[in-house]
């Protein structure tokens, strides 16, 4: 695939190295997944890349060279090489895609180049060149995404290019990127021009590309049919790594015996050759005949790097690393882990681990058990993800006790590379998986998690349990950014994502049982079939607590009820048109279970499609006693629980998920009059002129805040700061009577109840008296350096005061909060949170979530306020926060919402350079 240059075939005027050049932008380095599921590394070009660039050029076909340079060029001249590698990372930028080892002194091979040259303010000319062997793998699209992201950081807003008409692939890359491409043909060359600001379509295109690539990379691991297991052998490994390797080989033996898997070992057992179980033993990795799809490595940490390099030569697509001794072992281990990922990604491999329990999957009748389990679970349609190896042991034991079947289990260990996000991408495309369950000890990229989970949950249930309710837990070895976000932020991320969040593993499997083996509830109307009135009352209480709605349909069955009474009760429950879900509780005080009732309930549930859960003596989990076939021939099983409360809680979660899935989730908000470009230019100018060099936030003055907000269509009511009564009177005459007078002392700024704010001041005499009172109250308080003690502002229409804030968090990115102003709201934490990007439904939910929100809707006979104007304001702030991470904090306080409009009376903001976790840099090494 190729590619574009200026008409003369050269990349434009050279910038003298070191002359006005920016420092090497290490933040642009990235490890990415291509459309075939392999990985490669992107980074800015360096002067020492001249030899590699020449080798890349010489290796290209004559056609690709012609499409790139509009002429035949067997070699690049020294002058051309100097121009191409001598960029300034400002007006001239180039990114290269490389493969090969990441060690210092080890040559890398360039497989793609993307570059831009600034040709006029905010406009740059772009050129791409992709190695012949890597064309058609989406590399040009990935390079365009990353080059556009780098360009936006440098203030570039549009790309132009010249493309030969026969270069259809490159033209397609531009058109398919989701930008509005304008093109015309002149002198036999296609002139291309497009803005690179993100749009809904360009973001969707990038997300789709990422989704397909990451899904394919996981499929290569989970459907592998050739595996190599690398153990310590005589290399000096400890007993643990040797036993780990032997355990994995034992799990692979059944597949090897049946001829479904090709299994090789290195350093496991003695000797070499084919053994009776169909396992091929080798003395060295270099002796293994390639290609091999999957490698499982149990070696001391110091030996893993060399093994990874040799495995890469075999064409391995995934490396499952059981060993520890990496990031959790301190700085030396972290450096070892970074180097390992560089080697693996440079060779096209994904890494599962370190400290992984392994993976297992059943596909097309073949079970791939590359894990440490002694007894693999029965096949099923549940995808299970966890991180730590010890937890995988307990999870598998619990799965077995319940009789659940798994389609896949992946333990990511310290998730240096493969994470739950990758597996969710795969499960979104996998026809063998109906329900997804994740145990997350940490979430390294919550914004990406929310985006991927929301896409998956739209058509498959996702059940999540986190280690700690806050999501602030960071186990050793996990790469997680620090966070200052409130603990409720994670709850909001998960709620917006549509996942089912539960408290523990027990609840997770309870919910999975009903979602995997019953249809989704059609509603929350609940019927109860119980063995006594006391039990029925207990179930009704548990159902209500779980968010279900009890109906009058409560059927009681005596312990000695004859079969016809049992059948009649079941029939009445399942034929009631006002019933959506059924809870069956049969716990006799004497005797065992009731197989007749179990059979009738299973058949009725399958026949009617009514979601059913049961609590019946001697039955637990997924059992054949409660199984039946529905009208379409699908097997349905009523899950059995130990306690009625567990059954009701699982059913309540299922009903809430079904309601979320059926609800309108809205469209991304795009308020009119929002000019993100203008806001970005202002922030860049403020940062450039602030003089701050340590990255600390710069507090904006009122005029700067007003200008920033005006760019997104938010008007801040002007306020004049004054020192004394005379100046206050002059300010009031300028603004117009009546006015409000306030202290600028932070502790009293919004405290009308303490006298720090005086409202409806109608004339000069009243104003002078109020100024004296406010100054006396603020005596002894410091409003800040060079800040006048008073502020005068025109009176806004009366209404309800609210507070809207946005904070850029290192982990979660932008976090929006909204609440009604006042001490009660602050003390009780009556604040709602949202994580942009928001839809119109998200915005509406945000302003209705605080408990004090009824004050906005005509509380106690007062007139309803202009909530539409408030939602518009929230939407504008959310767009600003999402687009500009450099806006570190923004507070609108107070926002007075009246029956007709609103007034932003106070606004405060700070800016500082930020590096958002989910920027367009996939798989960035820790």
Image (cartoon, helix red, strand yellow):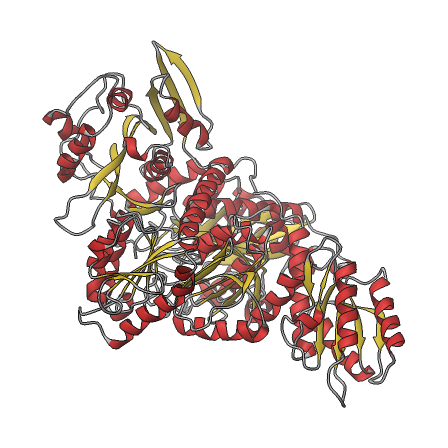
Q: Is residue 201 left or right of residue 655?
A: left
Figure quadrant of the C terminus: bottom left
The residue shown at (39%, 65%) is 253
| Vertical side of 688 occupied by 311: above or below | below
User: In front: 811, or 221?
Assistant: 221
* Residue closest to the far left: 78
21 on left or right of 805: left
Q: Quadrant of residue 529?
A: bottom right
Of the pair 267 and 205, the residue shown nearer to us: 267
Q: Quadrant of residue 478?
A: bottom left
In the depicted view, which residue is nearer to us: 596 or 924?
Answer: 596
> In the rendered view of the protein, which quadrant contains the N terminus?
top left
Coordinates of residue 669 in the picture (x, y in percent): 57, 42
Residue 297 horizontal/vertical position (percent): 29, 63
The furthest residue to the top: 187
Say if residue 170 shows up in the picture. yes
Query: Quarter-wise, where is residue 485 in the image?
Result: bottom left
Residue 432 placed where, x, y %? 55, 54
Considering every residue shown, the one lying at the far front of the view is: 276
Image-based side of 830 in relation to 156, left or right: right
Q: Is residue 275 left or right of residue 680?
A: left
Q: Nearer the viewer, residue 17 or 781?
A: 17
Indicate the position of residue 570 as horizontal and vertical percent values: 83, 70
């Amino acid at each position: 695939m190729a590619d574009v240059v200026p008409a003369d075939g050269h990349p434009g005027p050279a910038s003298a190295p070191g002359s006005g050049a920016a420092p090497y932008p290490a933040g642009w380095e990235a490890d990415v997944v291509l459309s075939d599921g392999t990985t490669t590394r992107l980074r800015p070009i360096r002067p020492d890349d001249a030899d590699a660039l020449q080798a890349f050029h010489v290796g290209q076909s004559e056609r690709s060279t012609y499409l790139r340079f509009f002429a035949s060029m067997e070699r690049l001249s020294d002058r051309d090489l100097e121009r191409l590698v001598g960029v300034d990372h400002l007006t001239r930028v180039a990114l290269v895609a490389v493969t090969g080892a990441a060690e210092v002194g080890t040559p890398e091979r360039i497989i793609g180049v993307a570059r831009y040259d600034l040709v006029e303010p905010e406009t740059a000319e772009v050129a791409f060149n992709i190695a012949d062997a890597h064309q058609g793998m989406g590399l040009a699209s990935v390079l365009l995404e990353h080059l556009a992201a780098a360009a936006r950081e440098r203030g570039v807003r549009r790309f132009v290019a010249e493309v030969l008409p026969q270069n259809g692939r490159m033209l397609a890359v531009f058109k398919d990127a989701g930008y509005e491409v304008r093109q015309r043909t002149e002198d036999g060359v296609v002139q291309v021009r497009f803005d690179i600001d993100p749009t809904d379509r360009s973001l969707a295109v990038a997300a789709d590309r990422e989704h397909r690539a990451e899904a394919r990379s996981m499929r290569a691991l989970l459907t592998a049919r050739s595996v190599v297991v690398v153990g310590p052998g005589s290399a000096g490994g400890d007993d643990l790594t040797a036993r780990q390797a032997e355990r994995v080989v034992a799990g692979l033996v059944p597949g090897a015996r049946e001829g479904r898997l090709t299994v090789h070992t290195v350093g496991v057992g003695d000797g070499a050759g084919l053994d009776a179980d169909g396992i091929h033993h080798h003395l060295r990795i270099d002796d293994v005949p390639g290609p091999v799809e999957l490698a499982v490595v149990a070696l001391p940490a110091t030996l893993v790097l060399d093994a990874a390099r040799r495995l890469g030569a075999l064409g391995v697509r995934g490396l499952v690393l059981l060993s520890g001794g990496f990031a959790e072992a301190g700085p030396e281990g972290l450096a070892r882990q970074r180097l390992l990922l560089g080697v693996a990604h440079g060779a096209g491999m994904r890494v599962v681990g370190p400290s992984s329990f392994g993976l297992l999957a059943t596909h097309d009748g073949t079970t791939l058990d590359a894990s440490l389990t002694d007894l693999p679970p029965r096949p099923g349609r549940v995808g299970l993800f966890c991180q730590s190896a010890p937890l995988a042991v307990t999870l598998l034991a619990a799965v077995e006790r319940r009789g659940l079947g798994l389609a896949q289990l992946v333990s990511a260990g310290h998730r240096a590379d493969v994470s739950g996000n990758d597996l969710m991408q795969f499960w979104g495309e996998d026809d063998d998986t109906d329900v997804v369950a994740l145990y997350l000890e940490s979430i390294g990229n919550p914004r990406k998690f929310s985006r991927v989970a929301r896409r998956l949950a739209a058509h498959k249930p996702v059940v999540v349990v986190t280690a700690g309710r806050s999501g602030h837990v960071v186990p050793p070895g996990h790469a997680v950014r620090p966070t200052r976000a409130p603990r409720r932020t994670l709850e909001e991320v998960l709620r917006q994502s549509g996942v089912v969040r539960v408290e523990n593993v027990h609840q997770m499997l309870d919910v999975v049982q009903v979602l995997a083996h019953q249809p989704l509830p059609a509603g929350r109307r609940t019927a109860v079939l119980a063995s006594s009135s006391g039990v029925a009352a207990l179930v009704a209480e548990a159902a209500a607590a779980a968010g279900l709605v009890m109906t009058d349909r409560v059927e009681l069955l005596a312990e000695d009820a004859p079969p016809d009474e049992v059948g009649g009760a079941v029939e009445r429950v399942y034929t009631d048109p006002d019933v959506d879900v059924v809870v069956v509780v049969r716990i006799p005080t004497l005797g065992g279970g009731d197989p007749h009732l179990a059979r009738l309930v299973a058949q009725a549930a399958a026949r009617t499609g009514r979601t059913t859960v049961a609590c019946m003596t001697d039955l637990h989990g997924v059992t054949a006693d409660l199984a039946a076939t529905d009208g379409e021939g699908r097997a349905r099983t009523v899950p059995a629980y130990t306690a009625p409360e567990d059954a009701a809680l699982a059913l309540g979660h299922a009903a809430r998920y079904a309601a979320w899935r059926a609800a309108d989730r809205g469209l991304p908000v795009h308020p009119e009059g929002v000019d993100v470009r203008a806001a970005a230019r202002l922030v860049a100018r403020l940062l450039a002129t602030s003089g701050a060099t340590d990255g600390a936030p710069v507090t904006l003055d009122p005029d700067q805040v007003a200008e920033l907000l005006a760019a997104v269509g938010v008007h801040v009511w002007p306020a004049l700061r004054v020192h004394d009564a005379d100046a206050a009177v002059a300010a009031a005459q300028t603004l117009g009577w009546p006015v409000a007078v306030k202290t600028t002392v932070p502790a009293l700024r919004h405290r009308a109840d303490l006298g720090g704010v005086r409202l409806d001041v109608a004339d000069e005499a009243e104003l002078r008296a109020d100024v004296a009172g406010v100054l006396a109250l603020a005596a002894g308080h410091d409003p800040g350096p060079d800040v006048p003690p008073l502020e005068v502002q025109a009176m806004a229409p009366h209404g309800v005061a609210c507070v809207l804030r946005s904070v850029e968090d290192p982990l979660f990115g932008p976090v929006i909060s909204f609440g009604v102003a006042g001490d009660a709201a602050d003390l009780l934490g009556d604040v709602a949170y949202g994580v942009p990007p928001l839809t119109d439904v998200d915005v509406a939910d945000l302003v209705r979530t605080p408990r004090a929100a009824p004050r906005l809707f005509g509380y106690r006979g007062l007139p309803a306020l202009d909530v539409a104007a408030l939602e518009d304001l929230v939407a504008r702030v959310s767009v600003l926060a999402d687009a500009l991470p450099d806006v570190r904090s923004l507070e609108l306080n107070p926002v007075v919402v009246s029956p007709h409009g609103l007034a932003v009376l106070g606004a405060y903001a700070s800016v500082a350079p930020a590096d958002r976790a989910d920027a367009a840099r996939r798989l960035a090494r820790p």
